[in-house]
Amino acid sequence: MTVLAKLEENKSMSENFSGPSEERIAYLEGLVGQARIAAAAFTQYTQEDVDRIVKAMVLAGLEQAQYLAELAIKETRLGVLEDKALKNMVATEFIYNYVKDKRTVGVIREFPERGLVEVAEPIGVIFSLTPITNPTSTVLFKCIMAIKTRNAVIFSPHPNAWHCCHEAVRIMYEAALKHGAPEGVFACLESHTLQDNAYLMHHKDVGLIDATGGPSAVKAAYSSGKPALGVGPGNTPVYLEKTADLDTSVVDIITSKTFDNGTICASEQTVVIDDEIYDLVLKNFADLGAHICNEKETKLLGRTVIDPETGFMQPMAVGQKATDIARMIGLSVKPNTKLLIAPIRGVGREHPLSVEKLFPVLAVYRAKSVDEALKVCVDVNHAGGLGHTAVIFSNNDEIIRKFGEMMNAGRIIVNSPGSVGALGGIYNDMVPTFSFGCGTGGGNSTTDNVNIYHYLNIKRMSRRTPAHMWLRIPNHIYFNLNAVENLRQFASRSTVIVTSSLLEQIGHVDIVRRYLPQQTRVHVEVIPDAEPEVKVVMQGVEALKLYKADQIIALGGGAVLDAAKIMKLKYESPEADLQELAAPFLDIRKRVVQFPTEKINPARLIAISTTSGTGSEVTPFAVLSDKERGRKVTLADYSLTPDVAIIDPQFVMSMPKGLTADTGVDCLTHAMEAAVSLYASPYSDPNAMQAIQLVFKYLPIAYEHPQNEEARCMMHNAACIAAIAFANVSVGVNHALAHAFGARFGVPHGRANGLMLPHVIAYNASVPSKFMPSPNQRGYGAHKKYAAIADMLGLGGDTVEEKVKNLVAATEQLLDQVAIPRSIAELGISKEEFERAMPDLVRSAFEDPSGRTNPRMTLMSEMVELFWSAYQGRGLAKVARASQQ
Amino acid sequence: MTTNAVWLKIDAERLVHALHQACENLNSAEREVALDFSFVRRIDPGALRAMEKLAGVADDKAVKVVLRGVNVDVYKVLKLVNLTPRFSFLA
């Protein structure tokens, strides 16, 4: 491929980019090609291979630490030889100490309890820019990180630190190669131009740019459009607060600011000192070798070491000794002067020394208050230091916390030196680094101390985790004839019976009274037998308060039981906001709004159902009608579940035929939907199946022979058992459709359910057009569940299909037996009216939470089809009816 | 598989040498050369360069090079250096 073709291929390059010569491109392509091959080969290495090579490199680096420091000083003329040697040792030994036991190959971390495994994937080729201030230490650091993570690196050192960096790369490369690293894993540009850098930054085979250096290098890296780690300049504010240990603080600051003549970008720049300690602190500085500049000297210093045009530091001062800088301005200082301290009165262009100074000149500011001190620190932070580093010396935790909140800095160093502290691993537990992420404040992608994990693509391998399930029911369930006698065992000082006027008239309340302990004071709160309204609930709550109830007995159908549940909630937790608690949710375990757990008036709720359908006596649901707002809200929470349920058939013996049919079909629908629910479990299945069996056997008898005690008892049990199932696994689209249709046309809930049921069974048994996501489901099984129900009922059939068909037919037959209308048309609703209502019906059904546990996701178009099927009725039923006639 | 293929077993210990030999064999090859990689566990940069050369020569001579028994680690390396489209693979 020709060089021009390569250029053409590199489509990500900007159109205006004037690139290197053809010859130079050939050279750069050679470097990238070699690195790419090395990186590819490197992917086959094991953790042991990598660790062996890293150790050898670290030892080589330590061996040559001083040699490389000498080279760096000679070439750059910045910094302090001893400190540069120390930095080289930190860059090898300390980094090794951090990385040596870390896994960077294959599986690197496992979280078995979460079914999660993290797997490392190398980046490939990294293009790395290194700075003049910490040249060899940065190269050593990056070489070790790259090998540890199985990446190849092409280095582009600062032009004025090229020789020492080249030598550092050579030492690392030779050590790595000797111990088995792939050939070509490191390369260093022989010389470079900005065009070379730009070409490599845009190269399609470069996976990451790691630019440590000045703002222009960082900006170029981020502008390339490549993933980049660009870490740049800082301007570290320091707050020396009056509670600090002054001796330690002053030594720490001097140590840090003079380290390598202040070339580490995390070093202290402006120290803000509390007024009360200011003079003492300056004296301490002076005693330990700092020269405190007077006003004239400060002005002169500012004019000399800071470029008045740009407001940035003069390169000639960077990394120079304090005495040399003093000489630059003609200032006579003691020969052992370590640091020049310049008092300033503000931050900004009028105060030139308030910016970053990578040399031993430190600005100080006298603050009259904590507030002023923090504000000045914020100003310094925003004057070129955003995202980098901030330092505080204090023993006041509150002020330390506030400082941490106010500073936009990736590293907030407390009671330790800024530069050496930010490097990590020496004064604190931060990750050791030679590359400080400055977050978005500094135009960077991270605030971290850049480390091995930034040189990896970390893949998360996540295993399927079944959702936790539950079976939550009342603490006590008493059933069979005269189960009400069990009321005797519940001691109560004051009991309020919530019921309807009809039940009071027919003597049900008297039966309940008979079994309450004699000492119990009893009040009867009669409410309308209709969906409870807020007003009714609140009146009930007032009665509970008035009688200081410690026990509530709900005696009635679903509406009365629901009202009592909500009364209890508001009585125990008056602050509960019913509208808020009715907020929609997808998964009850992850809901946004939580029901109150603190109860100021704890009361026991005993539910005695007088119908055999809703099962409200064991469910966590309650429906409330908010007439003022013209809406109905459903509350759902297990805290609403009654404490005690009494399933005594004597209370249902007088149910009229129509109610027997409606509630019985409601019960059947609960059980059928629970059986195929997405949440169906081995705990809910037996209940659902048992309820279905009981309904098929006893509903026709209870309907035809209302005084048949056994049939009434078994239907009453069936309602409760079905409710135990659906209270824990919810229902399905049948209920969603029935809720919408029943509300719109005023059709009783059980009847509406019955109109939909055969159609929904047939629908759920067919191959879904859209599956519902559910970690608990293993394959699609609704049709098999229906077939199992058919088998249980002895309906016959050889195949699943046949069994489902037989179940649909048997369901239709049962509905016929109890005179449930077989089509919506039969209710006298015209086709036109139904058609007009359709958009609202579908919207309402789709919003209904019941549908979310349906085994297949029901599309709106499918809801339309289901509604129309129910409108027309099924052919089978029509045929059956015709043959009966 | 066509019948006029030349089958060569690649020596994993002397991979680069074996690939150079394969490259030379292309001169006398028919339409197809099959290289048995069953024993190659790992591939180094030198071998990758030899593979690039082999692919280039095969292109020039219009010879199809089939690699047999390449393990998935080696296959991924070939993928990373864009060599997979230049060879055919047989299990």
Image: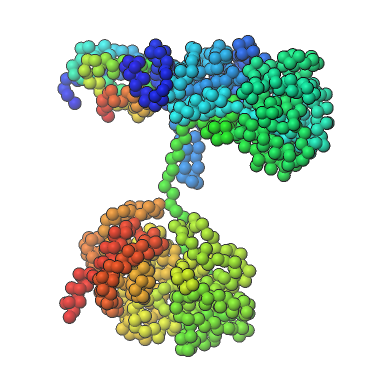
Q: Which residue is drawn at the image coordinates 20% and 73% (left, top)?
A: A878
User: Between A602 and A725, which is closer to the camera in this rendering?
Assistant: A602
Q: Point out the image quarter for the N terminus of chain A.
A: top left
Which image quarter: residue A416?
Answer: top right
Q: Could you tell me residue A124's position as x and y percent?
A: 44, 26
On the image, the x and y values in percent for residue A141 come to: 56, 23
- What x and y, as percent, mark residue A806? 23, 67
Q: Is residue A451 left or right of residue A398?
A: left
Quarter of the image where the C terminus of chain A is located: bottom left
Camera-side residue of A852 and A257: A257
Where is A458 relative to A610, above or below?
above
Q: Please determine whether, in this image, residue A72 is positioned above or below residue A128.
A: above
Residue at 34% x, 73% y is A745
Which residue: 45% across, 39% down? A460
* Left or right, residue A451 beside residue A819: right
Residue A750: x and y, percent?
Answer: 36, 74
